Image (cartoon, grey):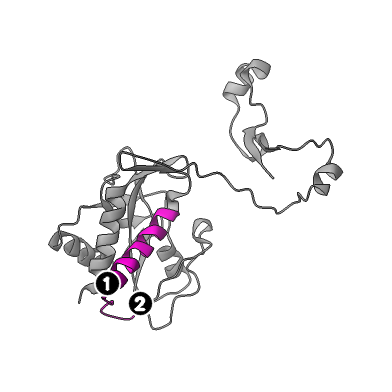
Amino acid sequence: MRGSILPTKASVHIYGNEARELKREAETVEVRLDARTTSKAETEALGVDVGDFVYLDPRVEVTNGFIRSRHLDDKAGVAAIYGALLALARAGLAPRTRLDALISNYEEVGHGAAAGIPDDATELVAVDMAAAGEAQNSDEFSVGICAKDSGGPYHLGLRRRLEQIAIDHGIPYRTDIYPYYGSDGEATWRAGGDLAVALIGPGVDASHSYERTHVASLEATIKLLVAYLLSE
């Protein structure tokens, strides 16, 4: 079923300033179905019901190395993980220590890595997006290394180690702080995980909107992951 997400008063030609000033919140946003239906019963007969998922078209475009899309947070991070593993496989290399890769379905709602981390794990490097924007140090051309987010500081020793790996390998990186942000690493700590946690990821502009990153940022993230996995 196709459709659109719109404000309940979307047209300025109908509602004038009321449309311009309408606050965007749950009560003023609707899903307009591309179906001829005039009642709840008719809509339910189409197979539409409470609890159904609404999927947004990502509208992916690649221009001059820039990648524009919805959901780069955190599909760009997942791409970086796969890119790092593929690079190791093609080079015939293996991580220095055992590696467990977890792609969590619930990262965006805050409890993605609350379970699934092996009990004997000693380090966790969460791969998420680095939020670029005004007053932030992150950008779209480097790998972001998070020092602190809304849940507090990440493991200082592991963070410094990742920064030094980036320096040693000439990988462009930026360390940053995100006051309105959380990650799988934070979820692991809150669930009682007793391990060193760090957070890295490609720089993404306009997070949770029509996002954008650059191929250079993905490459930097992949390179840092590979170098970390091969490090002593």
Taking 114 as reference, is 18 left or right? right
As drawn, the label of residue 99 is 2
Instruction: Name the residue rendered at 35%, 77% in the picture.
Output: 99
Q: Quadrant of residue 219?
A: bottom left
Taking 154 as reference, is 48 left or right? right
Residue 91 vs 5, above or below: the answer is below
Q: Quadrant of the C terminus?
A: bottom left
Asked if marks 1 and 2 touch (Cβ < 8 Å), the reply is yes
- Residue 86 drawn in magenta: yes
Total of numbered circles in the picture?
A: 2
Q: Secondary structure at mark 1?
A: helix
Q: Amino acid at mark 2?
A: Leu
Taking 109 as reference, is 180 left or right? left
Instruction: Name the residue rendered at 63%, 48% in the picture.
Output: 54
Percent from the top left, x then y, of residue 209?
47, 41
Percent from the top left, x then y, of residue 46?
79, 47
As drawn, the label of residue 229 is 1
Residue span colored magenta: 74-99
Residue 36 vs 168, above or below: the answer is above
Neighbours of disc 1 within 10 Å: few (<14), some (14-19), many (20+): some
Q: Farthest residue in the bottom direction?
A: 120
Q: Quadrant of the N terminus?
A: top right
Residue 151 vs 94, above or below: the answer is above
Looking at this view, is 221 or 86 the one in front? 86
Taking 148 as reference, is 207 left or right? right
Q: Amino acid at mark 1?
A: Leu
Percent from the top left, x then y, of residue 178?
36, 50
Q: Secondary structure at mark 2?
A: loop
- Residue 6 drawn in magenta: no
